[in-house]
Amino acid sequence: MRSYKLVLLTGMIPCSPILPAMPVYAAETMVVTAEPHTQSLDDVTPAAEQQATAGNLGKQKLINVPWSVQTLSDSLTRQVQASSVKDVYRYLPSVQGDGVRPQTRGMQGSVVQNSMIDGLNVVSTTEYPAEQFQRIEVLNGMAGALYGPANPAGMFNLVSKRPTDVPLRRVTVGGGTASGANAALDLSGPLDAADRVKYRLNLLDQDGSSYTHGSRQRNQYAGLALDFQLTDQTVLESNFSYYHFYQKGLPGSFALAKGTHFPSPLDPTKSQYGQYYAGNDDTTTTGSLHIKHDFDGNWLLDVGVLRQIADRESTTVTNTLTDNQGHYATTTANSAASRFTINSYLVNLTGSVDSGWLQHDLAVGMRGFVWKNNNPRDGGTQTLGSSSLEESPDYARPAYPDFTDRYHSATTTQHVFLLSDTLTFNPRWSLLLSGSENLFTVDNYSKTGSRSSNHDDRGASGSASLMYKPVENVTLYTTWANSMQQGDTAPAGANNAGEVLDPYRSHQVEVGAKYAPHKDLLLTAALFQAERPFAYTNASGDFAQDGTQKNRGLELMADGHVTPNLRLFGGGSWLDPRLHNTSSADADDKQVVGLPRFTASMLAIYSIDPLPGLDVNGTLRYVGRRPTDNANDSWVGSYTTVDIGSNYRTRLFGTDTTFRLAVTNVTNRRYWSNVVPGALTGYTGAGYASAQLGAPREATASVQFDF
């Protein structure tokens, strides 16, 4: 009988050391000794055996699922000293994660439907620290049949750190040229002699200036996980977290007026492109419960609930270029939601039935959420002034609204019923059929509290996958998917602002191959075509569906050791994203604004045998040129960045210790990042791009002790 007793999850933590407490010696001469520590404290799961959650199917081995799925463990994020989830997304070539909403394969992401923590929907437009999660799972492309209505932008599941069976006492201190000083504490282990109650406590404090003169940032995180082993077959998992993200004084975003184009990439360290008081002050509080029960070693039940409150005080500025001589107008908009609340849930039952010649792996369940928007009552858009790229404007702080004086502006409700069946005919052939019935409602409200509009819809999503395994370490598959998603909401500034468009239906076909040459190397390839209706604010000022976005692409990924000393993680993505059947001939059959044809990212980690405990790493990242208008008359150039770093594991005072050093953007390359068609809050513009300046060279150092 399978037990849900939790095992030590240090396997997800990289070659990072665990912080040991330094013993105190009185009236003695202190002798500092350092000896190489050749064995990592963390048991990293081999690449070919890694698992990820695949919707209502539950945990599945990556090599077996008929989708392109990648996982990034805590070991990798520590290796490169990634501080945020956005930092982690940069290592996935198919992910466009620099923006507010993460997305894959060039398809616009949503605020809630595409993002989860431990399988439960959460807000994607708030910040999350990398310290919070054991691993990050990304399913590329369409998965509405497994999760319910969602944009065909991939599914992002952030897996929380869980309590360990043995004591874990880890302390990390460090600092960086663009992050200030930081300290982190990670404690875990049993709370009782019978090991029935376990805990995991994570604390983080980061404070200092960023890379722009006069900027300031502070990040504070506290997370507590408690596991209660109610019976040998039942465990109750709880998670509570609080995160405060404060960042002011960095360059604002840049936007284009009609007929303008972006200049050569600017220097992001100059304070003239932002204001010292402008930025983000976000607080996110999340609590969740999961109860998991193993009935008989076959049938498993998972019931989960989550509540999240995300408060945002966004005072960022936008510099809109008004001509091609460098003149621009600076505005600040603060009418967007200042509070999101979300209550999400899931109920899932999985198990197998053997009917003789045919085996059924069944999954049945339901999931959903209630998501509420609250906007500042006195929010609006203010023009701070006009300037040019050669000047250094210093605008007076405007009268911002009281972000806590809010009105309830919208409620979105979604409920999904899910059913999947994997039919295994023999060890080589299997067929996966999945479907969902979807119900959702959108209610909009005025400042007086009266309901201004209501939108109800329902529909089905489905997918079918055929898998063939010629040998155990190879999977060939083809997947067809048809998915429903909620229609977009017309943005402020459109003639029909607030109107919810009719639901969209997206389609995708994918063929792929997965190969594990050995236990710790997984190679994957996927060829796909996806299409969805495309909406934007047209020349008449109406936000409406206008044509179809069709993306064709090829993804190649490698994860694992190619030699005993060399580990790779990364690959390349070729994408052909185009608009079809548009009302404007200038936009028809043109490349979608902001999307490159080719993206590549490769992280290499090499262990140096002559110096036991020493690893060096490097990351090469390339992003191709991107169009900045629907007619493709203007483009921003491609760019390449190089990151380097090292980790040295040793013992100090009998304590496992790891020293880390990382330098990102070694060549200090200037580039335009996060190019999107419209406002940076989503694809809601009129086809004229917005963009941000890429970060300059940054250095980070830390030391980690395991007591």
Image (cartoon, rainbow, N blue to C red):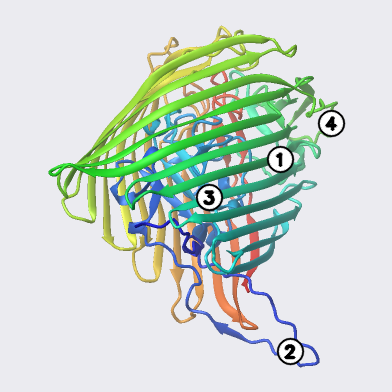
* Disc 4/disc 1 C-alpha distance (Å): 27 Å
- CB contact under 8 Å: marks 3 and 4: no
Q: Is residue 639 visible?
A: no
- CB contact under 8 Å: marks 1 and 2: no
Q: Residue at x 45, y 13 (%)?
A: 546
Q: Is residue 516 left or right of residue 77?
A: left
Residue lying furthest front in this view?
Answer: 231
Return the mark for residue 395. 4
Q: Nearer the viewer, residue 275 or 106?
A: 106
Q: Nearer the viewer, mark 4 or mark 2?
A: 2
Give the percent coordinates (x, y) of residue 162: 54, 56
Q: Mark 2 Cα within 10 Å, few/some/many (few <14, many 20+)?
A: few
Q: Which residue is mark 3?
A: 236
Give the percent coordinates (x, y) of residue 161: 55, 55
Q: Nearer the viewer, residue 312 or 423?
A: 423
Which mark is first along the chain, 2 or 3? 2
Q: Secondary structure at mark 2?
A: loop
Return the mark for residue 30. 2
Q: Is residue 82 visible?
A: yes
Question: Where on the picture, by quarter, is residue 325?
Answer: top right
